Amino acid sequence: MTGYRTLDDADLADKRVLVRVDLNVPMESGRVTDDTRIQAILPTIRAITEKGGKAVLLAHFGRPKGQRDESQSLAPVAKALQDRLGTPVAFASDCVGEAAADAISRLACGQVVMLENTRFHAGEEKNTRDFAEALACLGDVYVNDAFSAAHRAHASTEGLAHLLPAFAGRSMQSELDALTQALEAPERPLLAVVGGAKVSTKLELLGNLVRKVDVLVIGGGMANTFLAAQGKKVGKSLCEHDLTGTAREILEKAADAGCEIVLPIDVVVTKEFKANAPHRVVSVDEVADDEMILDAGPNSVEHVKDKLNQVKTVVWNGPFGAFEMEPFDAATNAVAQEVAALTKAGRVRSVAGGGDTVAALNHAGAGDGFTYVSTAGGAFLEWLEGKALPGVEALRR
Ligand code: AMP
């Protein structure tokens, strides 16, 4: 990775390394119920300790709104990390001041300490200079390994990077590598699949993608707004009729940029929004007034598969239909499985992420088959929108 400073560039021997990680893990009754995020930071912690550094972990948890709230303490997460890491993880009851300084002063090279929730202090989200300096004086080097928090300019995600030598951690590095290869320097043709509920939440994303991709496949509820923009009747379907003008503008922008837009040609319609409701497959010209579109039809799926077989890179965000309810998950499943199969065969690179996408791909049994699945929700979407992420920008060479 050439554009950013990474751990490979850092001399960490005997250094206090402040590492911003994402430990906002799901927890029930004081126990971590899913430790995916804990596993994701292990390579970074090990790289730091192997280089002889002292790893000082900084993270937020929940939304304590700048005040101490014991119910949002990171102490149980430190315990879960220790179990995973297989070596002791000390814990400091505050992320700044004496408690933090004492815990860090007791560390030998190669040891790890986790500091309490950064959001117990209002200066974190406000990114105040005082709070960033109170953090900075605890370390010699800063490492950011929390891509999922990089769209926020907080003290521990952005402010610190301007006060200490700053580097990307391993998980941040893999995320940036995958995203850069997919959208900034992709092997072409490049196809994006964008689905999900509404156009209104993805306007910027669609506007950015039509400028960058060769083929844009639009699915899910948002496709209905585009169909309505083309004068099709969409019955009771989820549709933002007030945005048909905007949808037409996006289609025009795509035509100007030479981006091919793929919309459904047939759809699965029903009269009730519930699993296994009676349904039928119709052409997009035949949706009745009392029907709603809940999925793309089999001809649409074949059409998308055909397009997928002609490209080298795929970026995916958002489900193709109301995938939480059978049988309206069929198009999402079929398209996701095709991308996974093409990826496994070495024919495409595929990157997916944002919102419900991870759940939709896992539901399809296809998540493991993608080249890279980002678990960062908001940050992934902002990246797809073409926005600069403050936490990432601060790591540029
Ligand atoms: P998003 O968060 O924008 O990615 O939207 C995801 C949601 O869109 C999921 O809960 C899907 O059930 C929903 N969705 C996808 N297609 C449709 C559709 N045709 N009608 C209603 N909801 C849909």
Image (cartoon, helix red, strand yellow):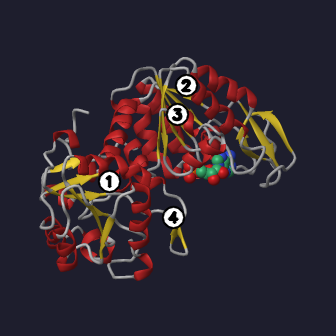
Q: Evaluate if marks 2 and 1 touch, with contact meaning CB atoms under 8 Å apart.
A: no
**Residue 238 in sight in this render:** no
Q: Secondary structure at mark 4?
A: loop
On the image, numbered disc 3 is attached to which residue?
370
Which badge, 2 or 1, is on the more N-terminal residue? 1
On the image, numbered disc 1 is attached to which residue?
150
Alpha carbon separation for disc pair 2 and 3: 8 Å
Q: Dot 1 surroundings within 10 Å: few (below 14), some, or many (20 or more)?
A: many
Quarter occupied by the C terminus: top left
**Quarter of the image where one finds residue 89:** bottom left
**359 or 384, nearer to the observer:** 359
Alpha carbon separation for disc pair 1 and 4: 20 Å
Q: Measuring from the top left, give residue 335's x and y in whole percent.
A: 64, 32
Which badge, 3 or 1, is on the more N-terminal residue? 1
- Amino acid type shown at disc 4: Pro
Q: Secondary structure at mark 1?
A: loop
Q: Measuring from the top left, give residue 388's x and y in whole percent.
A: 29, 46
Which badge, 2 or 3, is on the more N-terminal residue? 2
Q: Nearer the viewer, mark 3 or mark 1?
A: 3
**221 or 47, nearer to the observer:** 47
